[in-house]
Amino acid sequence: MSIKNCYEISLPLINDYRGNLVYIEGSNHIPFDIKRVYYIYDIPLNFHRGEHAHRKLHQFILAISGSFDLTINDGVNSNKIHLNTSSRGMYLCPMIWRSLTNFSPSAICLVFASELYSEDDYIRQYQQFILEANAN
Ligand code: T46
C-alpha cells in the first residue's frame, strides 16, 4: 500500500442563513462499510496522537472542529496534510503510518473506521511497520 492510495474526500456542505450542514452517507462518501466511529478531543498543547499503522483497517479522518496536521507515511514516501474544515477529510488505506500533530485548542478529530477496535490490527513500532510494509 502507498500514500497514493490515500486521498481527500470532500463532503456536501449546505449553507443557508441559519448556518452550515454537512452530511456523510456511508455508501456514497466513504469507500468502506463503517463499523465504528470515534473522536479525539481536549488534546493538550503540543501533544500528538497516532504514531502507528494498521494492518487491515481503513479509516476516514476529519477535523470536525479546529485543526491539526495529519502526516501519512508508507515507509518510502510521506505527506503532511492540514485538516481544518468539517467538510473535507482524508481516507487512509491499510499499512499507512500516521501521526497527528499541531492540534488547535478546539480541535476535534472525528474518525470513521472499517472494523471494530482490535489491538491486534495495530503496528505500534516503526521498525516492525517497515518490516511488514517491505514484505507486502
Ligand atoms: C488513529 C488515530 C487517528 C479503544 O478502546 N477503542 C477504540 O476504538 C480506539 C480508537 C482506541 N481504544 C483504546 C486503545 C488505547 O488504549 O484507546 C486508547 C488510546 O488509543 P490510541 O493510543 O490508539 O489513540 P490515538 O489517538 O493515538 O490513535 C487513534 C486510533 O487508534 C488510530 O487508529 O488513526 O486515532
Image (tube, helix red, strand yellow):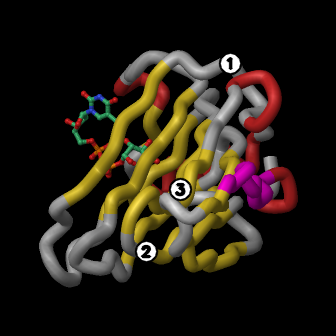
For disc 3, the neighbor class at 10 Å (few under 14, some 14 to 19, many from 20) is many
Drawn side of residue 24 relative to residue 8, left or right: left
Which residue is the site of mark 2? 68
3 or 1: tag closer to the N-terminus:
1
Residue 97, numbered circle? none
Measure how far apart labels 1 and 2 are at the Cα level.
25 Å
Residue 33, numbered circle? 1
Q: Which percent across, then down, holds residue 80?
A: 62, 78
3 or 2: tag closer to the N-terminus:
3
Which residue is the site of mark 3? 62
Drawn side of residue 49 relative to residue 61, left or right: left
Q: Nearer the viewer, residue 95 or 82?
A: 82
Q: Which percent across, then down, holds residue 31?
A: 78, 32
Q: Amino acid at mark 2?
A: Phe
Q: Amino acid at mark 3?
A: Leu
Measure how far apart labels 3 and 2 are at the Cα level.
9 Å
1 or 2: tag closer to the N-terminus:
1
In what element is the residue under mark 1?
loop
Q: Amino acid at mark 1?
A: Asp
| Circles 3 and 2: CB atoms closer than 8 Å | no
Q: Residue 12 magenta-drawn? A: yes
